[in-house]
Image (tube, rainbow, N blue to C red):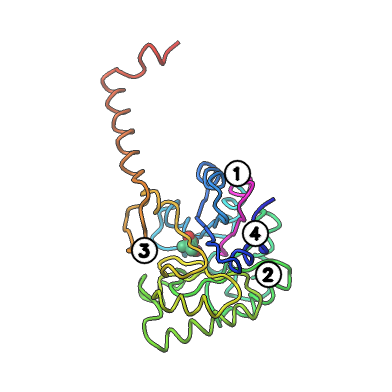
Amino acid sequence: MRFTVTDLLDKKKQKQKITMLTAYDYPLAHLIDEAGIDMILVGDSLSMVVQGNETTLPVTMEEMLYHTKIVVKSTKRAMIVADMPFMSYQVSVEEAVRNAGKLIKEAGAQAVKLEGGREILSQVKAITEAEIPVIGHLGLTPQAVLRMGGYRLQGKTEQQAKRIKEDALRLQEKGAVAIVLEVIPSELAQEITESLEIPTIGIGAGPHCDGQVLVIHDLLGLFERFTPKFVKKYASLKDEILKAVKQYKEEVEKGEFPDKQHSF
Ligand code: KIV
Ligand code: NA
């Protein structure tokens, strides 16, 4: 049985931390699931860490469906959350419900995640009414990079903080089952966490959230174009991979590989 929406709420009530990581393909999804992580996010960060784009804006519904299908197929235990990509829910409530439905029905996700607060309340309500669990995302919302003028700390001013707090409450009211809080001050994240019945899942939002999420490539040291302050690198796979590939190249060029042991 996979981790469910009920488990999510139970963990908050019992003050147990919720764990979430991103994955986009079989090798990592399978290992993350085996390690017992509660939730796997097929994030639109795939645009950056898998497709090599500068932002999350280019990734399409078709690409999200493709990666979500693979992650669902590769896992047994984690709840699979699919990000709704840029322009798949902003245009109309009808398009939002239809696209959320595809991520569930065609790709097999158990929940969808949408960025934004007051702008998308009717979408959150309608998707929830279609019996699809919705996860919100507030603070630094990467799909708004052009409006925000870069990836920077959100909720710094009192006015901004008030807006994020209100948005969190409104998302809960419309049926969201959890909210990701990205790159906001720890105290603000704590206030929001205490004001909500649904769990908060933080990334660069301090230790007081009900759960934490990171992009797996950041955690593993695989994506090093830049490393934000909130990322902790638990491994340096980039160095490992470079070393292995260079050694292979050298051994092939010298005629050392394949040797007798690796030949028939
Ligand atoms: O796309 C993503 O990886 C995300 C997380 C950073 C929360 O939305
Ligand atoms: Na995302």
| Disc 1 and disc 2 in contact, CB within 8 angstroms | no
**Above or below — where is 222 with respect to 251?**
below
**What residue is disc 3 on?**
230
Please tell me which residue lies in front, 1 or 81: 1
**What residue is disc 4 on?**
103
Q: What is the secondary structure assignment of the residue under circle 3? A: loop
**What residue is disc 2 on?**
97
The disc, 1 or 3, on the residue closer to the chain's N-terminal end is: 1
Residue 130 spot, x, y in % from top left = 73, 70
Work out which residue is located at the far bottom of the displayed protein and give it.
159
Q: How far apart are labels 1 and 2 at the CA level? A: 26 Å
Q: Tell me the mark number nearer the camera, choosing from 4 and 1.
A: 1
Q: What residue type is labelled 2?
A: Val
Q: Quadrant of residue 10?
A: bottom right
Residue 73 magenta: yes
Q: How far apart are labels 4 and 1 at the CA level? A: 16 Å
Residue 9 magenta: no
The residue drawn where x is 52% and y is 67% is: 210
The residue range painted magenta reads: 71-84
Q: Tell me the mark number nearer the camera, choosing from 3 and 2.
A: 3
Q: What is the secondary structure assignment of the residue under circle 4? A: helix
Q: Which mark is residue 74?
A: 1
Q: What residue type is labelled 1?
A: Ser
Q: Residues within 10 Å of mark 1 (few under 14, many from 20)?
A: some
| Disc 3 and disc 4 in contact, CB within 8 angstroms | no
Ligand 1 closer than 8 Å to label 1 CB: no
| Disc 4 and disc 1 in contact, CB within 8 angstroms | no
Q: What is the secondary structure assignment of the residue under circle 1? A: loop
Q: How crowded is mark 3: few (under 14 residues within 10 Å), some or many (20 or more)?
A: few
The disc, 2 or 4, on the residue closer to the chain's N-terminal end is: 2
